[in-house]
Amino acid sequence: MAESRTFKTNLQVSSSPHLVTTLDTRKTMMYVLIALVPSAVAATVYFGAGALLRIILGAFFAFASEWCYNRIMKKKDTTHDLSCLVTGVILAMNVPANFPVWMLAIGCGVAIVIVKCLYGGIGRNIANPAIVGRIVLLLSWTSYMTTWPLTRFQKTADAVTGATPLGMLADKVYDQFPSLTNMFIGNIGGALGETCTIAIILGGLFLIWKKIISPIIPCAFIATVFVIALVYYAVNPIDGYNAFHMALFHILGGGVFFGAFFCATDYVTSPIMNRGKLIYGIGCGVVTMVIRLMCSYPEGVSFAILFMNIMTPLIDRYVERQFYGIAAAEKAAKKAAKEAAAAGAKEAAK
Amino acid sequence: MFFRAKHLSSIDAGHYKNTADCETKVMPVPDVVKISMSQNIGAPCQPLVKKGDTVKVGQKIGDTDAFLHVPVHSSVSGTVTGIETMRNAMGGMDTFVVIAPDKLQTMDESIHKPEVTDHKSFVAAIKESGLVGLGGASFPAWLKYDPKNLSEIKTIIVNGAECEPFITSDHRTMLEDAQNVLDGAQALVKYLGAEKAYIAIENNKQNAIDNFNKMIKEQNITNVETFPLQARYPKGAERVLIYEVTGQQCDAGVLPAALGVIVANVTSTAFIGQYLKDGVPLIKKRVTVDGDAIKNPQNVQFLVGTLVADVIDFCGGYKAEPKKILLGGPMMGRAIFTDAQPLVKANNAILAFTAEQALIPEETACINCGRCHQACPFDLLPTKFADAYERKDVQMLRDLKVMQCMECGSCSYVCPAHRPLAFMNKLGKAMVKEADKNGRK
């Protein structure tokens, strides 16, 4: 009986697990793009259609760079993971609203081809491509990258460009400081994506809610900037503004929020472990404030993130690992060794 | 983290408990059973019967002199038609006793209620019952109940977590065999001299928890308690469960008994409760049959040695072409290459997936997101294991504590790049074991 029946054979065999999540790299990047929408809307409202055009072109240039690179190098096309779009949009949000488009194209090319593709593509780059792209643009065309158009609500007949709050601080023109409310809603000069703090917070909360990013890095980054500013201005007060006002001024008046939520949290270039993330976030805040308060650049977020990017492998390596079952045992062994050493020293002293 | 969390990391892998409300159907005696002589971790048994012999239900047909083993009993009455060597579900070769049942199910005369009075007779009875750990590891149960530090055993954990998606056989056991579970748990407490037994159940099986609470109250049982767990994967893994219930960390390679804890699967416990009443050895078991290729997903009680194909036929056969058939759950179960495979004692699920459900998307590059680390219950670094394995860096694997990995598959599940991390962990562990054996650095 049994011998004559037919069985299914040649079934697929593979190692467990046989079930995987539907959240893939592409979907992750999609969530980041969605989180950037509020900032893009705010940029369009404040700086006009030119801002939106630059954001879309930034995405396009980044996509084209990666596609062309893979085509020329005869590699498998990797643009479908959408990470290039994230890089392009973030880079575009880091430039002024009247930035020449061809320079943006070069920035995107540098970010994608040199920083990402030449290192081996997604996951292999040592620094955040958008941040390096921004720094290249800043060093190459400093005047274009530091001439900030005013928002449509600030513009007057004779003034179309103005300084960022941090620029005013560096120039010591304290009486021109915008109000904190204007800084919070983004009615100030600055790069097109980083001025409207409330839009950035919305996007950031969306990413945290969707568990795309961990809140540790942004919180540590922003809190560190706040605390350092608070202490600094308590020691070196500015006429007319208390330390608390200046601390808020520092976290709102530049790229801190945008950098903390969208650039510093880049998976590839930030530590894996929670403790490492905390060190990384605090490091970003410290370097930012060192540059702002002691160096000749008024803004230091991108340099701080780049600096911590290259520290990431080191952080990941030396953060103490707490494994289940191991930490307790090792701690006990260490303690026993220490006690033995102390006892030995005592003996020797006698 | 800076402080020890109350719960270990876990993932939400979905539940898919489609068959939770399906009452168990008893499958009729099949036309052939093939009983594996290797039903446990440790030494395989030698067949005690030969071709042409008549056997009865519960008759011992396999035993060995080796230490780490449990005897094998016939699940049917009938005639032995051959002793075959064929490939088992794990991929190795095993001896199988093939029996053509006479379908009368005549009980062996030797079966009687075991006389259990103390720990020693309890362990001897469990050994004779052929019980292996039914959670999936197939560790000989009698050895687990005979720890060297018997006096230090304080806690019995009855594992009814059933954290694997799809599987509901333990859930059905807890509902349909509740009295046996309680009896078994009390027997374990009594004969092992423990203080308390906790029946740990994930809180997605609230009806089982309520049922036990009611019975415990009605029968005035003081030494058994229910313990609700989060309904997340992998709460039912032994070392995770111990942490959740007692807060103790159990290192890999350390027996839970060293911490004063014995973990027993809920189906094992129910079997103990039953066995102490009638003395019928472990010859039948409940199994969940599910997956999108199965016509009527349900829970089935099968006789050990039944072919997978026969069980699936009993469930109405395939409604679509199966691509993958799993013994066990989708997270840790084994894929088998043919449905001519016979079932063993420890099988708790048969899942038949179509190509669509079996699809694992193509692997892409690691984006260093750290989700594998966040998901790992033991805070290991699967992505670093994979790197070290690819570089064949044994010392790095050791430093990263690869041997702590219990292969739960959480890392592979959450990986957005769909990397086979759990698989690489297994290879990494094998590499370290090999190096240790050869004394190589």
Image (cartoon, coloured by chain):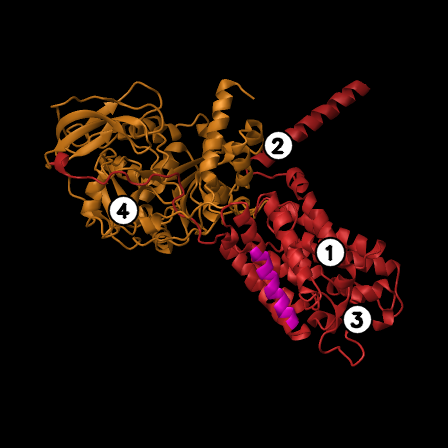
Q: Is residue A204 left or right of residue B343?
A: right
**Rendered location of residue A49, percent (x, y):** 63, 73
Mark 4 lies on residue = B322
Classed neighbour count for the residue bearing mark 4: other residues with Cα under 10 Å, few (<14), some (14–19), many (≥20): many
Report, in whole angstroms, how far the alpha carbon at label 3 lies from the one at label 4. 68 Å
Which mark identifies residue A330? 2
Which residue range is magenta in the image? A50-64
Q: Residues within 10 Å of mark 1 (few under 14, many from 20)?
A: many
Kind of residue sitting beneath label 4: Pro
Q: Nearer the viewer, residue A214 or A52?
A: A52
Q: Which residue is identified by label 3?
A: A162
B19 w.r.t. B94: above or below: below
Identify residue type, mark 2. Answer: Glu
Q: Chain of mark 2?
A: A
Across and down, in percent, residue A248 comes to 76, 65
In this rendering, the answer to whether A224 lies above or below B323 is: below
Q: Colour of chain A?
A: red
Mark 3 against mark 4, which lies toward the viewer? 3
Identify the chain drawn in orange. Answer: B
In this rendering, which labeled residue sits more in front, label 3 or label 1? 3
